[in-house]
Amino acid sequence: MYGTYAIAPYLDEPRSWSALATAALLVLGCVLLYRSPSTPSLGFSITSPLITGVSTTRRLGVATVMLAVLAGVWTAWATASEFVEQLLRNDTLAVMFSALLIAVFGGGALVKAATDPVVEEVYNLPNGSNRDAALALIRSGGRSIGLIERGLLFAFLAAGQPEAAALVLAAKALARAPVDHVNHASKYFLVGTLASVIAALAMSVAARAAVGLPIL
């Protein structure tokens, strides 16, 4: 009802009705997909011997959501295509996006080169609890964490917000606080973090200089 009220001034534009239909179909699809068993029954049920494996309600939900997506794409196509075209022609965005990719993925090579000596030191330790603990912590570091860390650092530095970048480092330091007692593991994380900071900082400085902004 509110949606109808909202589009009332634009009843002569078919895209307004398409937007309303998109919202209604999306809601209906989600209800069908995620209907709780505790939801009151409508008093009847529909079964089909032709559909097996997945319930009819879930299939209807998927189909309804797909219809909502198609309606939404049709509704937003003109505006979205113009917006995408403007993005593709934006040189500043191209520079920043390229620098982001280099910082995130190219920075991974820098981090690996910086931390490999530490990993080698750990493997050269005599067998024992210290070696096993250090290896376990190093293996739990996760490549995805480094990717996210460099991406966030670059985004904040490129946006001219070094204070926010410092918060990212503080959050990681708090998350890694329990490993401080393991010497080689703490060294590994410290070296890796510094390498990530260097990669993100170098690319953010280069990107900002390339588009004519102050480097910091």
Image: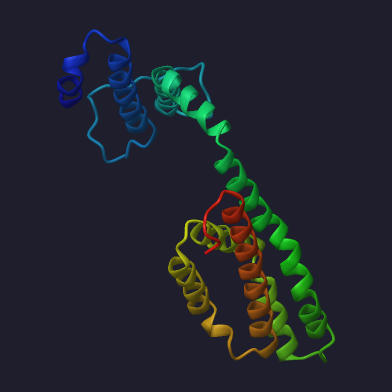
Residue under the image location 57 percent in, 31 percent down: 89
Q: Is residue 10 left or right of residue 157?
A: left
Position of 191 relative to 209 (above/below): below
Asked where in the image residue 150 lies, by quadrant, the reply is bottom right
Total labels drawn: 0
Residue 1 placement (x, y as % from top left): 15, 23
Nearest to the observer: residue 133 or residue 160 = 160
Residue 149 in view (yes/no) = yes
Residue under the image location 22 percent in, 14 percent down: 10
Position of 47 relative to 192 (above/below): above
Residue under the image location 55 percent in, 61 percent down: 215
Residue under the image location 64 percent in, 75 percent down: 194
Residue 70 in view (yes/no) = no
Asked where in the image residue 9 lies, by quadrant, the reply is top left
Nearest to the observer: residue 75 or residue 180 = 75
Residue 14 placement (x, y as % from top left): 31, 10
Position of 84 relative to 109 (above/below): above
Nearest to the observer: residue 207 or residue 97 = 207
Nearest to the observer: residue 34 or residue 16 = 16
Residue 205 placement (x, y as % from top left): 60, 61
Residue 144 placement (x, y as % from top left): 62, 59
Q: Is residue 51 left or right of residue 144?
A: left
Q: Residue furthest top?
A: 12
